[in-house]
Amino acid sequence: MKWYIIKRLLQIIPVILGVTIIAFALIHLAPGDPARNMLGQHATQQEIDQIREKYGLDKPLYVQYFIWLGDVLHGDLGRSILSHEQVVVEISDRFPNTIELAIAAMIFAILIGVVAGIISATKQYSATDYTVMGIALFGISMPVFWLGIMLMMIFGIFLGWLPIGGRIDLLIPFHRVTGLMVLDSIITGNGAALISVLRHLILPGIALGTIPMAIIARTTRSSMLEVLRQDFIRTERAKGLSERKVIYKHAIRNAMVPVVTVIGMNFGLLLSGAILTETVFSWPGVGRLVVDSVYARDYPLVIGCILVFALVFVIVNLITDLLYTYIDPRIHYE
């Protein structure tokens, strides 16, 4: 196991380098001049040239990349061109919000998706099966931005049950400790803040979690059907075990490996920045930060966010692989 982890960690290095090279090239090839964005349309050419020289934008692209890479190896992701704030600080301020949103979305996706998949598999070819799979297909097909807008209109505007944007009601006092607002509300014993934060999480969490929920439901159903046809399941039934015990004690655990794979991949993607959801709901996370920095041609901030996204994704996938050994003891990493 130890050597497998070391091998996987070493494999992360070329992946991250490849991602940063592609991202660095693409963002610099995009039209627009960050120096002109920074100074405005009425800036003189001399002022623009001074800014370009100050931030190294006048150097060849490969030189800029190696300068940036050298700073990264020393723990410095650079400074935002527009705000002049450290990129690490900008991302660390926003990342807890994305973590909370991703966790809320995955809790919704796992609870609904796994249960729906199990029910659908145990009632194969029934009306329940067709209904659940129809809803799953509909969930996969819905664009996130459209679903988000529909949820806002129905539950936020027409019914007025839930807030349609932000993180917490502005009039509620809040003390930040960890940056995770749900956890901070619990730590400080602020019940009003906890209720407000959870209410603000519901709509974006559902919008973001609908596609993973549908994928998890379909994967759970397929995996359960495959396991239920295995010989050991027929043996357990022949022993006289109840159908409930066969399913919940023996079938589910053996069906979870592909489901955990899907959960891990989707959680990594959600943590990598739920750009559309954060934009629609005005959610102050890393995904929205990327959108704002792309519009502003803030190269250091864009590249820093992409680097964090890539690291999060590969680390989550590594953790997912390691979980296999606990779900299925037959799996060993040599």
Image (cartoon, rainbow, N blue to C red):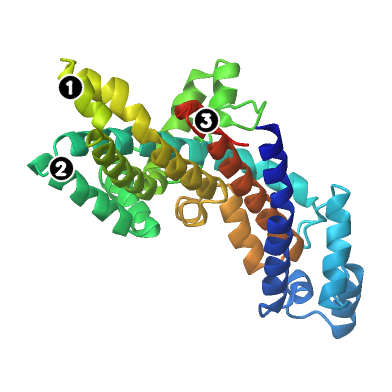
Q: Residue furthest left?
A: 127
The nearer-to-camera label among 2 and 1 is 1
Three-letter amino acid code of the residue under disc 2: Asp
Give x and y (percent) for residue 120.
19, 39
Where does label 3 land, which residue? 325
**Please, is residue 23 above or below residue 313 in the view?**
below
**Please, is residue 39 above or below residue 145 in the view?**
below
Residue 168 as seen in the image, left or right of residue 229: right
Secondary structure under badge 1?
A: helix
Residue 22 as seen in the image, left or right of residue 246: right
Residue 237 - label: 1
The nearer-to-camera label among 2 and 3 is 3
**Which badge, 2 or 1, comes first in the chain's sequence?**
2
Q: Residue furthest bottom?
A: 45
Give x and y (percent) for residue 138.
25, 54
**Which badge, 3 or 1, comes first in the chain's sequence?**
1
For the residues bearing labels 3 and 1, Cβ distance under 8 angstroms: no
Identity of the residue drawn at 73% across and 79% down: 41
Secondary structure under badge 2?
A: helix
Residue 156: image quadrant is top left
Q: Nearer the viewer, residue 118 or 93?
A: 118
Residue 188: image quadrant is top right
Residue 248 - label: none
Distance (Cα) linking label 3 and label 1: 27 Å
Where does label 2 land, which residue? 129
